[in-house]
Amino acid sequence: MYVWGTNISVQDVNAAIVRFLRNFMEGPTQADSIEEGKYMRELDRVFEVEREWIDIDAQDIFSYDQDLYNKMVRYPLEVLAIFEIVLMDMASTRNPLFEKHIQARIFNLRTSTCMRNLNPSDIEKMVSLKGMIIRCSSVIPEIREAVFKCLICGYYSDPVRVERGRISEPKRCMKEECATKNSMTLVHNRCSFADKQIVRLQETPDEIPEGGTPHTVSLLMHDKLVDAGKPGDRVEITGIYRAMSVRVAPTQRTVKSLFKTYIDCLHIKKTNNSRMQADDPMEVENSYNGSEDVTFDEQMVQKLKDLSKKSDIYDRLTKSLAPNIWELEDVKKGLLCQLFGGNALKLASGATFRGDINILLVGDPGTSKSQLLQYIHKLSPRGIYTSGRGSSAVGLTAYVTKDPETGETVLESGALVLSDKGICCIDEFDKMSESARSMLHEVMEQQTVSIAKAGIIASLNARTSVLACANPSGSRYNPRLSVIDNIHLPPTLLSRFDLIYLILDKPDEQMDRRLAKHIVALHFEDIESVQQDVLDLSTLTAYVSYARKHIQPQLSDEAAEELTRGYVEMRRRGNFPGSSKKVITATPRQIESLIRLSEALARIRFSEWVEKRDVMEAFRLLEVAMQQSATDHSTGTIDMDLITTGVSASERMRRDNLAAATRNVIMEKMQIGGPSMRLMELLDELKKQSSLGEVHLSDLRNAVATLTTEGFVAILGDTVKRV
């Protein structure tokens, strides 16, 4: 018996598959060992957990029988059918009570094809592709067996199976007494359906040629593969490249001359080992997660635990983070805390507190902000990197499009939703449009994206940390102005960042020399030889992944005490001598930030409890970040009003004093309804009063505007009239 149109003998292939499954051993074994083969043990495991598939590594087939491997790649449909027959025979002999149909899932082909190299010659062959999932359709029920009922006598037919994608309806009733023609109707409650899903896969950036745009390809997932991958996942797909004809119109049988291609999926495996594995509750619930999920073996766990016990682990991790960037110790410590993250808290009442830490880096050009962003993006579990000018509001959140397959309106995820459970890096934050920035308010505090467009009303999860970097307006940071005046960002958005770092470029001969030496050394020395105690990337990612997955630190009593004491202390600093008004030096958002930072610091040490030293370090990190961004230059104290409202308390007091002084001068010099007075004369009068210090015309205009709103004066061009 030969497979039609080929020189493949069914018996030969059958015998080869049986030999492979029975005899394949992993690694060298003794000739007289009686140990069972790898796939026999796998088969026993299938019986134990009663699952319906067995994963088969294509490399094993190649190393055992190259001829079988070649046949399988060239004629996958036929060879896989034989594979399943053999598996069912083996299952019935080993375990006669096992009734499920076992599928063979092949993965890890020797060659991975690039998406744009798929040719007509590849049709009906097995291919392996890498890419990122950008869209998943909803689950589509696909009919497998149909049952028909006679409308006249109510007789039910036997189940009719699908053959080549179509079901033939019985022409007449099977019951001999009835035998009515064309009286059968489909009974959908008795039919059996299978799950099907259409997924779009997009090329990964490293495979796109110069000046090209990414290609996409459709995948068809069946049964257990449905929902194995989510949008945003980087995956490796093994499947059969197929083509199907497309009808010109659904009612006509005429087909187009161009065929539509898709990939029938056999196996999906999540790649990205360089990235951390975020703990995903969905993967724990589904027994199948489509991949050999990163499980930490005993040896690795022990190595990580030994690392965490070292006293200098915090400094070592800080050094290992972007080792090519010089200094910036405190910024790196903040970013390290962001990678580890705090605990998300859900109360019984339904209120939630986020565990993600948001960081903003502001600084002069050339202070390696974007470099840090790129590094964090490579490390983070599901990171998306976007730039401010090139991102629209819908591109960040979600947009409504028409699905080309079904023609209905569907919701497509944007960058923030795709980086759910990861870190969204936004470069050039100051150049974003107003509408795009306003979308971030909700994401950064509530961690959801709410949408009401085209009849779709939805709330999407965006549990993401935001790492943004911005240049000050006018390119260089002006130390005499407040942060708000330097970066034109709304104060409401700034207050949602846990840490705001100013990275300033101050000329200093010694520092400049050391920095220049470091950068030059990167180009001609081997950096690894210079820094011995730096962890390599794989160890760092494993360390962070393990901490995020297994360690949920709780606040200890002394830590809680210290947090309360420190917060009250921070608030107390706002009492100005000789002023009745208090300056707000911290808000409740700061105490939440402190809790998140302390939990992240406890995670770094693999500690189940947040200790006092973690809280102290969290306060220090917050102080360092606020010292620069929220310091009022005229008084030298930290003032949260600068970030929350954009005007410091001392500035507000000065404005009030000026308005009061202006009122007094006007009352002295002018009568109600009398002649008007020029602004310049008013300014000269105010300058005579020594208590006010330096007064500018712009300040005076603001003061007069305040008095106008009170209805005390009227302003006409450059003159003021008392009313």
Image (cartoon, rainbow, N blue to C red):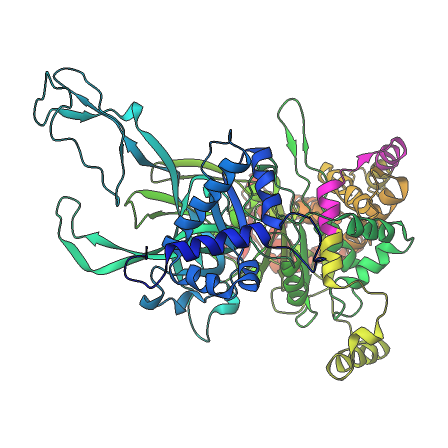
Q: Is residue 478 left or right of residue 620?
A: left
Q: How far across and how far down the image is residue 458, in percent? A: 44, 36
Q: How far across and how far down the image is residue 629, in percent? A: 73, 55
Q: Residue furthest front?
A: 32
Quarter holding the N terminus is: bottom left
Occupied quadrant, residue 471: bottom right
Q: Does 564 lie within the magenta span?
A: yes
Q: How far across and how far down the image is residue 180, in percent? A: 8, 22
Q: Nearer the viewer, residue 677 or 211?
A: 211
Quarter holding the C terminus is: top right
Occupied quadrant, residue 624: bottom right
Residue 199 in view, yes or no: no
Residue displayed at 83% across by 76% down: 529
Give above or below for 200 relative to 191.
below
- The mark tally for this picture is 0
Q: Nearer the viewer, residue 257 or 213?
A: 257
Q: Residue furthest left?
A: 181
Q: Is residue 265 left or right of residue 481?
A: left
Residue displayed at 73% across by 51% down: 544
Q: Which residues are magenta?
A: 544-565
Q: Is residue 450 left or right of residue 547?
A: left
Residue 566 in view, yes or no: yes
Give above or below for 112 relative to 665.
below
Query: How would you classify the magenta stretch by its main secondary structure?
Result: helix
Q: Is residue 121 left or right of residue 16?
A: left
Q: Residue furthest bottom?
A: 524
Residue displayed at 54% across by 42% down: 673
Q: Nearer the viewer, residue 707 or 165?
A: 165
Q: Does 546 lie within the magenta span?
A: yes
Q: How far across and how far down the image is residue 664, in percent? A: 70, 44
